[in-house]
Image (spheres, rainbow, N blue to C red):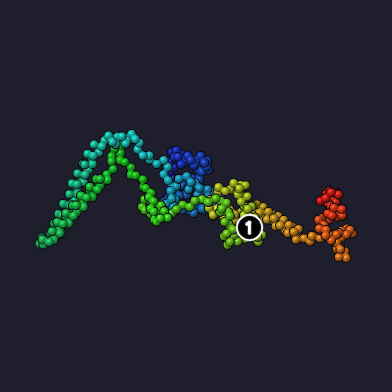
Amino acid sequence: MKRNFYLQHPIMAMNDPRMKKLIDKERLKGSGAYWFIIEKLALLPEPRAQLEYLQPFCVGRKIPLSYLQKIIREYDLFIFDEDNYFTPAELNPAKKKDEKSVENVSGTDVSVSENNRKVQKTSRKKAEKESLKVGNSLNGSLLPKDTPAIGKENIKDIKTTATTEEKEKTAADAATLPSVCSSGSTPPPPPSVTVTVCDEWAETVCDEWDEPRRPQHPIRPWRELVDELGRHRLWMEMACMRSGYGAMLARHLPEAIEFFKQHVELYGKGDNLLTESDVRSYFVNFVSAGGRTSKALFKELTDNEARKKSELRESSADPLRYEQIVNGKRTYLGCPIPDDAPPRPDPNAVWNEELCLWMSGRKNKGKPD
């Protein structure tokens, strides 16, 4: 942990286009989330961490981790490396030189070339002096006076090789010297990102060191993530146990998931559900025993179960329940019923012999039902 418990806040940070975009879309809530992340990164020896590092700071503060992940991923304010670590990007980076400075550079090409020749000449003389020092040290007291001719030839070869390498190095350095203008040296170009095609079908994105980067997975719609909750059987059983009415929740799991979708849409929580972990955590809180949403879900499932049982009883009931069997003959209220008559539909129905149908005495009184 750092000794100084503070960090520098650039005064012109809000002039960065990315920060302006953040304020326009997220208001001051987004700005506060950004500086909250910067503060937590400042606690580390190096300002880089994985997304899971922010999880403990969200507990008890009513700060959803999914919202912090949204700030990190969507506004280009942080940079991800190959290990999926993120670091804060530079705000208001130095701009490239404008066309006027380019014209000044072209107007001073003669002086620049003269400076380059002087630098090359100085480097060449310095390299020759160094090679002479090496030769003198080899010919000095380190070797005996009676050194054979073969050894001397080898020393000469070493001197020649050293001189050649120094000259080549000096020429290469001079060729790569940056051009100098009146305002200073040209900044080095930013590292480039190359795309290396591994085969006919796969494509790997590499960084400036030709190391493959971990691909970023696209954010899926939250409804798809909710639909996949029932596929994880072991996890779903544990979630049902948290509800206190696990057997009923397991029997009516599709209805519970639909009720959960309605809750998310009603309260506008879909934007916070970015990953499968977010959906799971929210669903567990939704069904946990003692919560308001858990009680509402229990009542909904109880009503659905009672309604299904009632429909089942009505469909499986005796069709002749509004009739009496006397001496093997169908009757109602002491009146006989023809054998080919349909079952009496309700306890108030009366058989019309002229029309050969049942008439409802409660509703129509003499009109066909």
Residue at (52, 48) in percent of width and height: 67
Tell me where residue 30 appears, x and y as whole percent: 51, 43
Helix or strand or loop: what does disc 1 sit on?
Answer: helix
How crowded pointer 1 is (Cα within 10 Å; few <14, some 14-19, many 20+) is rated as: some
Q: Is residue 103 left or right of residue 315?
A: left
Report the front residue among 254 and 40: 254
Decide: is 58 above or below 100.
below
Q: Say how many tags the image has.
A: 1
Residue 205, can we see it?
A: yes
In the picture as drawn, the residue positioned furthest to the right comes out as 334
Residue at (11, 62) in percent of width and height: 148
Tell me where residue 212 appears, x and y as whole percent: 40, 54
Residue 141, can we see it?
A: no
Residue under label 1: 253
Report the front residue among 28 and 98: 98
Residue at (58, 57) in percent of width and height: 229
Tell me where residue 132 appears, x and y as whole percent: 16, 51
Report the front residue among 128 and 283: 283
Residue at (36, 52) in percent of width and height: 209
In the picture as drawn, the residue positioned furthest to the bottom comes out as 327
Residue type, mark 1 in image = Leu
Tell me where residue 278 appears, x and y as whole percent: 55, 53
Report the front residue among 25 and 318: 318
Q: Is residue 345 left or right of residue 271?
A: right
Decide: is 364 above or below 342.
above
Task: Give the quarter of the image for residue 190.
Answer: top left
In the picture as drawn, the residue positioned furthest to the front comes out as 354
